[in-house]
Amino acid sequence: MAERAKPRQAQDKLAFLLSLVPYLMDHDRVSVATAAKHFGVPQEQVREAVRLIGVSGIPGDTAAYQHGDLFDIAWDDFEENDEIVITNLVAIDDSPRFSAREAAALIAGLQYLSALPENADREAIATLTAKLSRGASAEPSQVAVEASETDDTLALARESVTKGVQLSFDYLNSQGQAERRRVDPLRVESVDADWYLRGWDHLREAVRTFRLDRISNPEVTAEPITHGATDVSLPDKLFEGSVDDLIVTIDIAPSAAPLLADYIPDNAETVEHDGRLRTTVRVSHYHGLKRLVASMPGVATVVGPPEARAVVAEWAAAGAARYR
Amino acid sequence: MEERLFSLVLALLATDSGLTKNEILSTVQGYSQKYSHSGDNSNLERQFERDKDDIRELGVPLETIDSPGQAGNNQNLRYRIPRGAYELPADIAFSPEETALLNLAAMVWREGSISGESRRAIIKLRSLGVETTEPVLTYAPRVRVRDAAFEPLGISLEKRQYVRFAYLKPGDAEASVRTVAPLALVQHQGRWHLYADENGTNKTFLLRRIVSQVAALAKTFPAPPADTKDRALLELEDVWNRNTAIVEVEPGTDAATRLRRRRGSSVAASGALELHYSDTNIFADELASFGPEALVISPPDLRDAVRTRLERSAADHG
């Protein structure tokens, strides 16, 4: 693994060097802090790159890397004021092209995001895709993601954030109860074809995650929001554990384990058992569990506690009974 | 290491007529220090071969040309990076709004080598110096690439190499070994598919049903047309449109809300939902999760598949 990781890092650093030079050319004088912020990298990475650029160049006519064959920077400004001024340029005039795979990654990403209200202008997306293709050094790789469907809820969530007001909607929780919820939208997240809204829930007075396809009758209200995206720090995991969570032991086929990754706590102990993995999952109630397990027939089995097994058995049996 | 790669790119950008391998190894920083004028440089030559691959992977068009009057003499091949093919065309610019969209598009990839590629694409984009506009609503989109076959297939796709793998078709007891030319990787309905040519016929394989390692073969194939990935998606969409299920849902339940909101869902005259799907087994898994809230009326194979699943789950937990 380490051997593979090393060239990757070197490639990342090379891409940064080749990108930093044209940026510096366009800025007669720029602080290390500004450049680091622009590229989204630590300041020390910029300093390291500038030090390297300052002593790099081309062999030149004499093949001896003479002074004029090297980049030069105003070293005093750099060492004393943390500012970058390039005083001699060699070889590089412009930004590099995207690789076929780089362009393809962005194009496929754009395609996937076509449901966002920001992407309502399909023509703009087509123009952008064409620019990326033309800006690549080879035909972009054949990788694509199905366009997501435009969803009214997203447009309304955006509108409510713009206006600073709450969004209300009917929401069916996984126990099957419908409630009218009022939410300050904080962030829209997705995993493949599933989309989620995370927001401050005024009913629960806490951050909650809502599946977009469980939301009905969304409405922008006149009530001002109390929590903005910058006021609340959202955990990375879409589904957070809580102290009230129920712990369930489950046997799962190794190939299907990734499907449950979101529910398996970080410290869960996993052991092999008859060719299956035995591990624990956290769920807020058994009603969510029964749906999850019923979608993995023969692949995931609840081992215990007995109540959890019974809830799944009853759910599946009730479903099967409808076919008799 | 990046010092040597950077020096190599600079040297090859600066030359019009190209440099021979010997000139590179004996003069370019990072190589010249290790170059022996009398002895064996085979280690350094192997290093140079790896560096060429690393640089090309970044989209740097490193090309070889014959030395004048010495066509076909491999020892005297000359290497260079033609400026026009290296630089982003001058008329390509991105607005702050476009840059913001591309930042989001890059955020979609957070696993595997494709996340590295999108990260590098963004670094290159930032070299243009465009400031971005912040979107009103914050987004954290993510497409997963968890199938083990994704990485090796992506590489073979790029190198246009035939691949061989074991594929388990649902209902089959054993996997069959398939040898195909990989043409495109597409995600449809949240699942990755390989679109490939098998003995002259285009076929679609579900990545999660590839049950062996993917072996890359030496044999290569010509580049497919640029719109191959779009054709692959269209074919999947055709299958999806052709497969129609009639499903009764209990009003007011999770099944009613979510299946009604499923893409392409409509209400049939009977009041039941008419739904489209790609794959009987995968859709049956999804429908089984709804337990008694959904009842499949047709087609019979889907109905049987859901029923069997529910009976299995009930038995496993009884």
Image (cartoon, coloured by chain):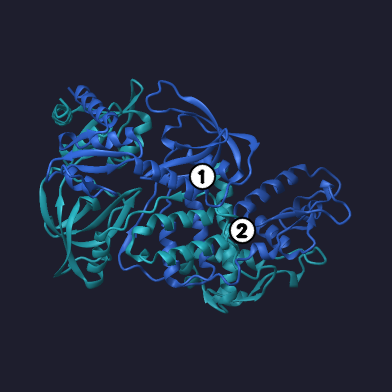
Find residue B123 and report its horizontal and vertical position in percent. 52, 62
Question: Is A206 rendered above or below residue A70?
Answer: above
Label 1: chain?
B
Quarter of the C terminus of chain A within the rendering? top left
Q: How many dots with numbers?
A: 2
- In the current view of this chain or complex, which residue is farthest to the bottom? A28
Question: Is B212 rendered above or below residue B23?
Answer: above
A221 left or right, relative to B228: left
Q: CB under 8 Å between callouts 1 and 2? A: no
Q: Can you tell which mark lies on residue B184?
A: 1
Find residue A209 and report its horizontal and vertical position in percent. 23, 52
Amino acid marked by disc 2: Ser
Q: Is residue A78 visible?
A: yes
Q: Nearer the viewer, residue A158 or B116?
A: A158
Q: Which chain is blue?
A: B
Q: Nearer the viewer, residue A273 or B76?
A: B76
A222 left or right, relative to B210: left
Disc 2 designates what residue? A137
Q: What residue appears at the point 21 percent right and 24 percent down from the top-left corner?
A: B311
